[in-house]
Image: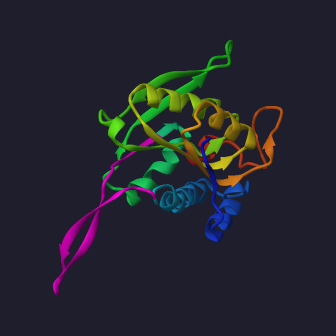
Amino acid sequence: MSKLFVMDHPLIAHKISMIRDENTSVKDFRELINEVALLMGYEATKDLALTKTKVKTPLAETDGYVVEKQVALVPILRAGLGMVDALMSLIPAAKVGHIGLYRDHETLQPVEYYCKLPTDIGDRQVLVLDPMLATGGSAAAAIDFVKARGAKKIKLMCIIGAPEGVAVVQKAHPDVDIYVAALDEGLNENGYILPGLGDAGDRIFGTL
């Protein structure tokens, strides 16, 4: 079974409270999403393998380390884009793919409308990014599509998660660990996370 990591850092808790506030401006909301994603990135990448090397300082030679396995960031369009810049600042060598999904109104199943991934995705640690893990349908489908294109090592990073969405992803992908900044109470009758923060995409891009 995949592991669920719920962040317990006080700075994350503080910023999540600000993100939830309906009076937070678009500018501040976007910056806070960026900051939380950056803090989460340290936790999600702490198991990257290292190769020992040698480094010569101005005074002496010493041991150094190089990240052995490179990273691919795969935001789910469009809200996942709000998490990319933070992780790129943390991992400048990361490659970025994109997945676009919509829900078929008749079947209610996620349908892929866009997918562009690095050609070496199978050799990379993949971080699938989406601020909200609500029903889990889109996240599970996105991971399906990434796996179908060769990805082998995948993690899911979300700002806010609901227990229902976590359960769906864990059942569909027991090999994928999940990282959330906060785990909320559950979903309302419309599938929105409570207390949540509203529609992340609309609040990031100002399309309320």
Split into 4 quadrants, where in the image is the C terminus? top right
All told, the count of numbered labels is 0
As rendered, which of 6 and 193 lies closer to the eye?
6
Q: Is residue 157 above or below residue 64?
A: above
As rendered, which of 164 and 20 lies closer to the eye?
164
Q: Quadrant of residue 79?
A: top right
Q: Is residue 53 magenta?
A: yes
The colour scheme is rainbow
Main secondary structure found in the magenta portion: strand
Q: Is residue 148 above or below residue 173?
A: above
Q: Magenta residues, as a range?
A: 47-74
Q: Quadrant of residue 152?
A: top left
Residue at 74% in and 48% down: 196
Residue at 45% in and 31% down: 146
Query: Would residue 206 be found to the left or right of residue 195 on screen?
Result: left
As rendered, which of 132 and 43 lies closer to the eye?
43
x and y percentages locating residue 102 in the rendered image: 58, 24
Query: Would residue 54 be found to the left or right of residue 41 on screen?
Result: left
Q: Quadrant of residue 130?
A: top right
Q: Pick out the residue farthest to the right.
A: 189
x and y percentages locating residue 35 in the rendered image: 53, 61
Query: Would residue 187 be found to the left or right of residue 158 on screen?
Result: right
Q: Pick out the residue farthest to the front.
A: 1
Q: Is residue 100 above or below residue 37?
A: above
x and y percentages locating residue 148 in the rendered image: 44, 25
Q: Pick out the residue farthest to the bottom.
A: 59
Q: Is residue 107 magenta?
A: no
Residue at 53% in and 56% down: 37
Split into 4 quadrants, where in the image is the N terminus? top right
x and y percentages locating residue 157 in the rendered image: 55, 47
